[in-house]
Amino acid sequence: MASSFSSAAKAEVCRILPQKHCCALAECFGVLLFANNFSADGIKIITESRDFAYILPKLFKKAFDLYFDSYPSLASPGKLVFQIWDSDKIETIMEAFGFDAQDTLALHVNLPVVEEDCCKAAFLRGAFLAGGSVTSPSKAYHLEFTTTHLSVARECEALIHETVGFPAKAAARGGAQVLYLKHSDLISDFLTFLGAPVAAMGIMEAKLEKELNNKVNRCCNCDDANTSKVVEAAQEQLGAIRVLRDRGLLEKLSQKIAQAAQARENNPEASLSELAAMMEPPITKPAMNHRLQRIVSMAKEVTQ
């Protein structure tokens, strides 16, 4: 199965394994708050990222010194599901984040867990791995996090602004809370912050390619418009020359005007610059335009 842009970005992020216990705890906190289920009833983390599935047990072992109760086979296609249902393990995890497993209050971001800058980065990496995605820049500029916890979304919105210096937008979608970025530069900066510089470079390369293609298209459109104007002007000039010939006036033109008329007739597709160079002696483009406009004006005078 071909790797998506989002899965490639997550693979990059997965290469950064937390060295300190506090960062492992913070990254697991991000994972759990953006996981499919994190409650006293159980923990369920579902992912399609093989890279994330590979490091997830290591993260939990480092943070809590415990193992999942249910593991998926990394060789299995589709979604991979990790679960914990043992009440003692759930209580250990809840207490690590300052929660009471018996308390039914809404989950939130416990700020002491993300107090240090390194822990803030680890937390956001975990949130992205568990509940985040980034669209291929060939389609659109869009990066998002999805959680079922309203308070978590609001607190993460503030955390992102504080940590990286720009705000994420928030929206509700089908009962979930979504934080998202739409600007290419912001997405690129955020991916770099998470530890995915190759994906960030992919965003910027796609942006440059789009800008170049747009510029080429504008130039082509401009060239087409200019070509149309040249053709229309030449047809008008040729028509004026025919009018003057039919009226017997062509032979009465001055030598300079007659020379311009002959050059246009012999070169109906030539530009003004090319016609100007054919004159004896060569003249400027404005001077050539003046001579041809004089022919058009004379033709209009005799047909009125």
Image (cartoon, rainbow, N blue to C red):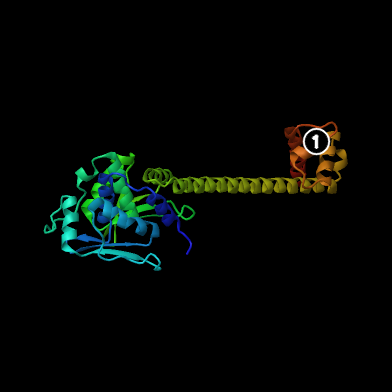
> Regarding mark 1 in the picture, which secondary structure is present there?
helix
Most extreme residue toward the left is 102
Residue drawn 39% across and 53% down?
Answer: 10
From this view, report whether residue 238 is shown above or below residue 2: above
Residue drawn 85% across and 33% down?
Answer: 280
Pick whichever, 104 or 151, lies toward us.
104
Q: Which residue is mark 1?
A: 277
- What is the quadrant of residue 54 in the picture? bottom left
Q: Position of residue 209 (x, y in %)?
A: 54, 47
- Residue 110 is left or right of residue 201, and the answer is left
Residue drawn 23% across and 57% down?
Answer: 66
Pick whichever, 54 or 298, lies toward us.
54
- Residue 273 is left or right of residue 170, and the answer is right
Residue 181, visible in the rendered structure: yes
- Residue 87 is left or right of residue 164, and the answer is left
- Residue 272 is left or right of residue 137, and the answer is right
Q: Amino acid at mark 1?
A: Ala
- Give the number of callouts: 1
Q: Position of residue 115 (x, y in %)?
A: 23, 41
Q: Position of residue 17 (x, y in %)?
A: 35, 48
Residue 294, visible in the rendered structure: no
**Mark 1 Cα within 10 Å, few/some/many (few <14, many 20+)?**
some
